Amino acid sequence: EKRTYYLAIDIGATSGRAILGTLENGRFEMEEINRFPNPIIDIHGFLYWDLFHLYSEIIASLKAVKTRGIPLTSIGIDTWGVDFVSFGKDGEPLRMPYSYRDTHTFDTPEKFFTNILSKKRTYLKTGIQIMNFNSLFQLFEQRERHTSIYPVTDKFLFIPDALSYLLTGNMVTEYTIASTSQLLNPFDRTFDNDLLAELGLSEKNFAPIVFPGTPIGALSETICRLTGLDPVPVIAVAGHDTASAVIATPAENKNFAYLSSGTWSLIGIESKEPVVTEKTFALNFTNEGGADGSIRLLKNICGMWLIERCRNEWEQEKPISYEELIKETEKAPAFRSFINPDASRFTNPKSMIEAIQSYCRETGQPVPATVGEIARCIFESLAFRYRQVLADLQQLADFRIKTLHIIGGGSQNNFLNRCTANAIGMPVIAGPSEATAIGNIMMQAKAAGIVGDIKDIRRVIRDTIPLHTFIPERHDEWKAHYTDYIHHFQEK
Ligand code: LRH
């Protein structure tokens, strides 16, 4: 079998990367070609993504591939969920897309439930966890505020689809990314026309839905001219980063849950069918689309965002390496104060450090002050939050969950991996840390006929990527402190 090469463009809410994947005789290799920040741009209090910056970085990545003379089989793009770009009738982008961190949708769900459709009906129609930034609410808010681009938008494209369009000139709506919008019927995997009508929209405002593995088109003349590349095909991979990551979960059987750990922590299971019931409504679990026809039954938890934001604040005084951060954390006393990582005050506070401190003060706990104390508070709270949500997940699963696979960048945090294993009382298997890019590459390889189904893909990953297992060693001690975490649990 000859060597084949794939380029994964994987853009998260904090940074993006271009990863070159190579497959040969069932062996897999990868290499980072480019890495770039994905800053949120604040203009007059509105938060935007810089679409053109991302476009330029993709061009730079393609040029780097060209310089090295690599014969690419294809390119695939995945990004974070829910956000979208407006395009006019002439196909031009109308302005920069809002970021889901923008505060203008904070009260939108309540408005929507009061005036349009109840919370329960909305959930039962879509099976999607109610979060204020879901595309449904972003669109509703834009309409309510009479934004000038809303009525002149011909097509709304989700971020990976928008970027693929800039590269190829072809518009599609990839299914997994669209499934994050809260606009789809999870059972028949099409847009819910009633919901669209409530927004004054129809299916005409979106490109046709395609499933992962579908070719979108070849690099346009402009891109070929700018990069020197041939018209390489762009493939619709699982455009939602979390869906790509789940593909690359190196599970051997079905008795597992996954935790895709990045800016967000997405914790869930694979399900053959959507699970949209009173219970999932009460627990607010989401049913997002998977790449292989399965459903990702999961919950969105605030993840590394907490520590990333604190680290930014610490670094304004002096740089602190990740190793130092963990050393400080290990030195700090255990089980002193806990937060609910999902409390609304942590969504986008002016100062994350102060937000954490005020939570602890208001709940009558010791107020963490040093780097180590604050980091420990974050990591222990996250581990307990995982335990809490995993217990809910076990109630929904029709099988016994026996291991937790932690994938994504956050899986490199061995301190947190150890905490998590102890908190949940089951083995944690950590890796791959680049699960998202790997899932992206594997979908391309599948489209090229180089790998088979998801089982085959996971076997290739297990055979190639070193994984680390963490066995719970102090579960009883952690169990004893779980009640403190629950005791101080607050929504706000
Ligand atoms: C993770 C993620 C998550 C979404 C959020 C907006 O990057 O895609 O699954 O819900 O970003």
Image (cartoon, rainbow, N blue to C red):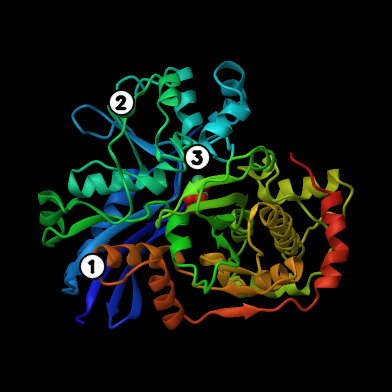
Q: Which residue is mark 2?
A: 153
- Amino acid at dot 2: Thr
Distance from the alpha carbon under mark 3 to that under mark 1? 31 Å
Q: Nearer the viewer, residue 194 or 275?
A: 275
- Identify the mark nearer the N-term, 3 or 1: 1
Q: Position of residue 339 (x, y in %)?
A: 76, 52
Q: Quadrant of the N terminus?
A: bottom left
Q: Which residue is mark 1?
A: 64
Distance from the alpha carbon under mark 1 to that under mark 2? 34 Å
Q: In which quarter of the view is residue 146 placed?
A: top left
- Identify the mark nearer the N-term, 1 or 2: 1
Q: Residues within 10 Å of mark 2 (few under 14, many from 20)?
A: many
Q: Position of residue 439 (x, y in %)?
A: 40, 64
Q: Nearer the viewer, residue 5 or 309?
A: 5
Helix, strand or loop at label 1? It is helix
- Amino acid at dot 1: Ala
Q: Quadrant of the C terminus?
A: top right
Q: Which residue is mark 3?
A: 100
Q: Decide if residue 488 is in sight here.
A: yes
Q: Nearer the viewer, residue 54 or 403?
A: 403
Q: Is residue 276 left or right of residue 50?
A: right
Residue at image location 43% in from the left, 82% down from the top = 463
Helix, strand or loop at label 2? It is loop
Residue 440 sits above or below residue 351 on the image: below
- Amino acid at dot 3: Tyr
Label 3 CB-ligand 1 distance < 8 A: yes
